[in-house]
Amino acid sequence: MLRRKPTRLELKLDDIEEFENIRKDLETRKKQKEDVDVVGGNDGEGAIGLGSDPKSREQMINDRIGYKPQPKPNNRSSQFGSFEF
């Protein structure tokens, strides 16, 4: 594999302005979210999944990561295949 010299990156004024705009936007969103959490925290369900039963918490995690468990079959032929003697 050929080695090449590192590429020089130059920071422009537009890049700095864009970064600061995005950072301010994220800070305002974070403050709004904190305000909603403080107002919504009074009903006892401020944290997600802490007050719920384990099944619904597990289901919420599975939905978040996109895992869809398949039910396991209970008969022996599905476990070992169909052997014929």
Image (cartoon, rainbow, N blue to C red):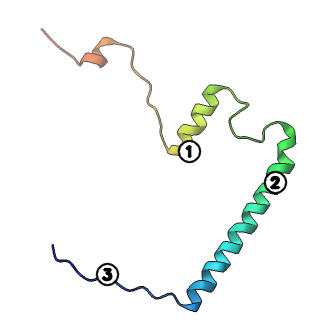
Count residues near mark 1 (Cα–Cα under 10 Å), then give few for <14, some for 14-19, many for 20+: few
Q: Quadrant of residue 31?
A: bottom right
Which residue is at a point 60% across and 38% down the rendered structure image? 60
Amino acid type of the residue tagged 1 in the rendering: Arg
For disc 3, the marked residue is 6
Q: Is residue 57 above or below residue 4?
A: above
Report how far apart the C-alphas of labels 3 and 2 lie in the structure.
Answer: 46 Å
Residue to which mark 2 is pinned: 36
Q: Amino acid at mark 2?
A: Val
Q: Amino acid at mark 3?
A: Pro
Mark found first going from the N terminus, 3 or 1: 3
Residue closer to the observer: 41 or 64: 41
Q: Residue, x 31% and y 81% (percent of image)?
A: 6
Judge whether 54 appears above or below 15 on screen.
above
In this rendering, position of residue 37 left or right of residue 54: right
Residue 2 percent coordinates (x, y): 16, 77
Disc 1: which residue: 64
Q: Position of residue 62 (x, y in %)?
A: 53, 38
